[in-house]
Amino acid sequence: REVLDTRQISPNVQETKSTLLTASPNGGLTPSVQTTDRETKTSDHNIEFHKSTSLPDSNGNWQLSEVREGTVKDNGKDRTKTKEERVLRPGTDGNLSVVERTISKESENATGDKRETVATYSTNLPGTPIDDSLHLNQEVTTVHRKSDGVQTTQTLVEQRNPAEPSGSLRVTQEAIDIIRPGTAGTTRETQTLQSLDSNGELGVVSVDTRKQDNSPAVHVDIAPAKTPQPAAAH
């Protein structure tokens, strides 16, 4: 069970507190996760957010486990949106420190094509010791296109090579989703997934094809027919 409490602190500030209750050994419900999410509208196109998550310790006292904070900027002129987020977690000394940072950018052109890029920076890189510096670890680019009724979504995942942690990012996965219109309201969807093989090259892992009927349902009236009423005598 989740208990939510949302309050409008001021015209530009909204806060939501959430408590998640899960089953306990005695058969009741006990609080297991507590979050506080605050959004502040700093201008017409900018929002600042701050979300803290706490977990109970062995004595049942709430302990702060994670903080996510950042900004969302929406530029209505050129249809772009940027989100920056920092993730902070307590270290061995109990103090919060930044362990991850993400930068997301969304854009849309005049024809309706959309592009989204999410870059993730982390202090924990595969194959290297953990330090206090943030390093680019992964970048995911998703492109949505629509032309002549055909919808195409292409997703590229770029990551570092654990064997060469100091090298640049490389494409490790590619997913292509194509939806084509058919006859009589049907659509045909093909999903292709490619991943790195043992030779370090992209190879097809799976191809999934499905057909969907989008035609409107036919309405059948099953109500009993009305009995004609005899004409009134004159």
Image (cartoon, rainbow, N blue to C red):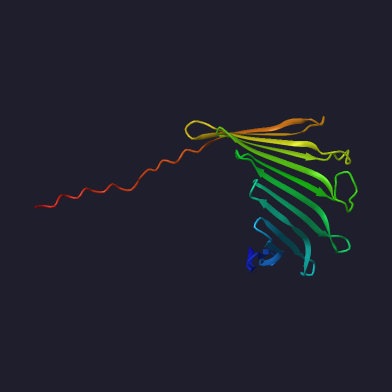
Quadrant of the image occupied by residue 218? top left
Q: Which residue is drawn at 90% across and 52% down?
A: 131
> Would residue 51 appear left or right of 190 to someone viewing this image?
right
Front-most of 210 and 129? Answer: 129
Residue appearing at x 80%, y 67% in the figure: 58
Nearest the eye: 17 or 136 = 136
The reply, left or right, for residue 128 in relation to residue 7 is right
- Residue at left offset 74%, top offset 36%: 173
Residue at point 76%, 31% (across, down) = 202
- Work out which quarter of the rendered image holds the N terminus and state it: bottom right
Q: Residue 119 placed where, x, y %?
A: 77, 46
Residue 224 percent coordinates (x, y): 30, 48
Asked where in the image residue 71 lies, by quadrant, the reply is bottom right
Whether residue 38 is situated above or below residue 149 in the rendered picture: below
Q: Give the residue at the far front of this rendering.
A: 77
Frontmost residue, 78 versus 228: 78
Determine which quarter of the picture holds residue 198.
top right
Q: Is residue 113 above or below residue 7?
A: above
Residue 30 location (% of width, % of height): 69, 67
So how many labels did they put on this image? Answer: 0
Left or right, 129 with reference to 59: right
Taking 223 as reference, is 64 above or below it? below
